[in-house]
Amino acid sequence: MDKYSVEIVPKAEKEFLKLPESVRMRIRKQILSLENNPRPFGCKKLKETEYYRLRSGDYRAIYSIDDNSKIVKVLSIAHRKEVYR
């Protein structure tokens, strides 16, 4: 199985850097694991979009998967109250 490359858009990077350190460590590990498995157990495809959601406590990472070019693009990382807006 080929590895996917993980890209984080600038908006998501800004959101990520604002998170508490403990949350950042946990989410960083989960995002890096998307290289090997872009659809891990517990990820969820969002209704009526082509995006996926990764849960980490009260925080969510929203990302898209391009299987043809093997790219996972992280679009947003935020608290669950704000991430879907």
Image: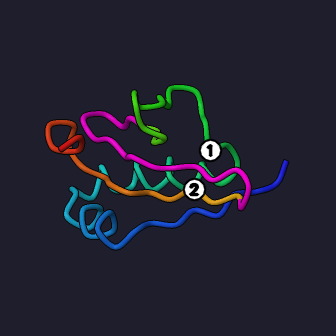
Residue 38 image point, x, y percent: 62, 44
- Over which residues does the magenta segment extend? 53-69
Is residue 80 shown above or below 61?
A: above
Q: Are marks 1 and 2 in contact (CB under 8 Å)?
A: yes
Q: Residue at x 29, y 68 (%)?
A: 11
Left or right of residue 55: residue 85: left
Three-letter amino acid code at the position of disc 1: Pro
For label 2, count other residues whose C-alpha is less than 10 Å away and answer few (under 14), some (14-19) or many (20+). many
For label 1, count other residues whose C-alpha is less than 10 Å away and answer few (under 14), some (14-19) or many (20+). many
Three-letter amino acid code at the position of disc 2: Val
The first of marks 1 and 2 along the sequence is 1
Name which quarter of the figure residue 16 lies in: bottom left
Q: How many marks?
A: 2
Residue 54: image tag: none
Q: Which coloring applies here? A: rainbow
Q: Is residue 63 magenta?
A: yes
Label 1 secondary element: loop
Q: Residue at x 58, y 49 (%)?
A: 65
Q: Residue at x 75, y 57 (%)?
A: 3
The image quadrant where one finds the C terminus is top left
Q: Residue at x 24, y 49 (%)?
A: 78
Residue 6 image point, x, y percent: 57, 62
Q: Which residue is mark 1?
A: 38
Q: Is residue 35 magenta?
A: no
Q: Main secondary structure of the magenta part?
A: strand
Q: Residue furthest left?
A: 81
Name which quarter of the figure residue 35 lies in: bottom right
Q: Which residue is mark 2?
A: 72
The one of 22 and 68 positioned closer to us in this rendering: 68
Label 2 secondary element: strand
